[in-house]
Image (tube, rainbow, N blue to C red):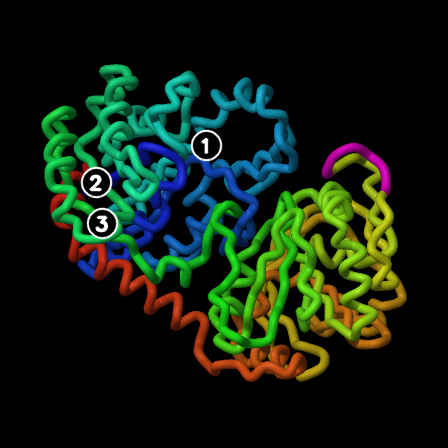
Amino acid sequence: MTALMIQGAGSNVGKSMLVAGLCRAARRRGLSVAPFKPQNMSNNAAVTADGGEIGRAQALQALACGLDPHTDMNPILLKPESETGAQVIVQGRRLTNVRALDYARIKPTLMGHVLDSFQRLRAAHDLVIVEGAGSPAEVNLRANDIANMGFARAAGVPVVLAGDIDRGGVIAQIVGTQAVLGPGDATMIAGFLINKFRGDPRLFADGYDLIAARTGWRGFGVVPWFAQAHRLPAEDALDLASGPATGGIKIACLTLSRIANFDDLDPLKAEPGVDLVMVQPGQPIPGDARLVIVPGSKSTRGDLEFLRAQGWDIDLMAHYRRGGHVLGICGGYQMLGSRIADPQGIEGSAGETRGLGLLDLVTEMTPDKCLTRTRAVHAASGLEVEGYEIHIGRTEGADRSRPFAFVEGAPEGAISACGRVTGSYLHGLFTSDAFRAAYLAGLGITASGDSHAQGVEDTLEALADHLEAHLDVPGLLALAR
């Protein structure tokens, strides 16, 4: 037993969740299991034990395996900076910034890195569960593919194809995928499964049998909708949604065009005393929000212009004048200052952009990228905060004399003279339960007292139970070779 790959008949069919659940199911069988995704595209990244960065989904899958995240689990990470360009991260480190057409030219050079990482994981573990990217049906991208069938054939890994019935057309998704694949690629597929079924799965029995008859592939089951999925970190910004209306105090977060590391919000969304609202483009910031969060961004100056185009700068100033609180995290922290300079054009065209002016700070983008797990002490409460930093740029100014926290005795972040505007480079700060409770108390919100980490663990266990109940898990694991 060495590896199994889950590919999707389309994007967003639930591959990441399926892999996380199967990883936990394999671990419960006593197997040493690791996740792997050859190529990912996401601005939601995690800092690894070896000081690099990978997609957030692979960090969650590592947790499901009982492992620390490692750069080998996602050797190629693409972080979009515009509609046509992205930063290319190879084995945790930035290689270059490219436009989409140029990436196609460098992709053939990346397979070696992918296979090196995969072989290291395979040598260290009983089982590697691999997640594809997008869909192998995108045969126009097949040349030099490293994410789906190109990888599967190069590494000799059997594939199970997952279809999403919730969006409709799942029969065409799976049968059509077989129709467009080349014969060599089609032979890599050992079976299929159906995900996200709402209602009684027995109602799809005829469709399930039709897929098996048309493709000749073995069916491994129909997975009903997993209602607790929202309790796990989402990787795709398209999945971002407001939390359930709780009648609690409203916290609003701006949905920037290049929003990054938005799982910062998950612990807040889970709090029953918080009504978390994701402010979508074109919508005003709610006038009754107690706190407005300006989140991280992969394109800080670009998203600052995007913010202004929505009129959110005007709304923010009105919110501030009403006595509201503002929190900027990472790129959002940089935006709260008076100016952002990028003289070398690291994040886009060279130049500088006027900031929001809510903090007396200036940021200059620099080539060096900070990638570190961080333990800090919250200046106001003295409580420990665990998080991570993943940013470029250095921020200085008068408001740094009032730090948000201290890291090894050094000041981190900044607070305005009035105390209602805070900026910090620390991602993941709200996962620290005691700090979260203290911070929310300052807004007049009583925290639940629940452990965020335990909530994620419980949800992973429930996910594994869910897959065990509806999939032929022993059959899937027996495919690995």
Judge whether residue 97 can be spotted in this image.
yes
Q: What element carries label 2?
A: strand
The 10 Å Cα crowd at callout 3, few under 14, some 14 to 19, many 20 or more, is many
Q: Which residue is drawn at 12% across and 30% down?
A: 210
Amino acid type at image mark 1 = His
**Residue that mark 3 sits on:** 223
Mark 3 touching mark 2, by CB under 8 A? yes
Q: Distance between the residues labelled 3 and 2?
A: 8 Å
Range drawn in magenta: 347-352
**Residue that mark 1 sits on:** 113
Asked whether 298 falls inside the magenta stretch, the response is no
**Residue that mark 2 sits on:** 193
Amino acid type at image mark 2 = Leu
Q: Is mark 3 on a helix, strand or loop?
A: strand
Q: How far apart are marks 1 and 2 (CA)?
A: 30 Å
- Depth check, front residue: 234 or 38: 234
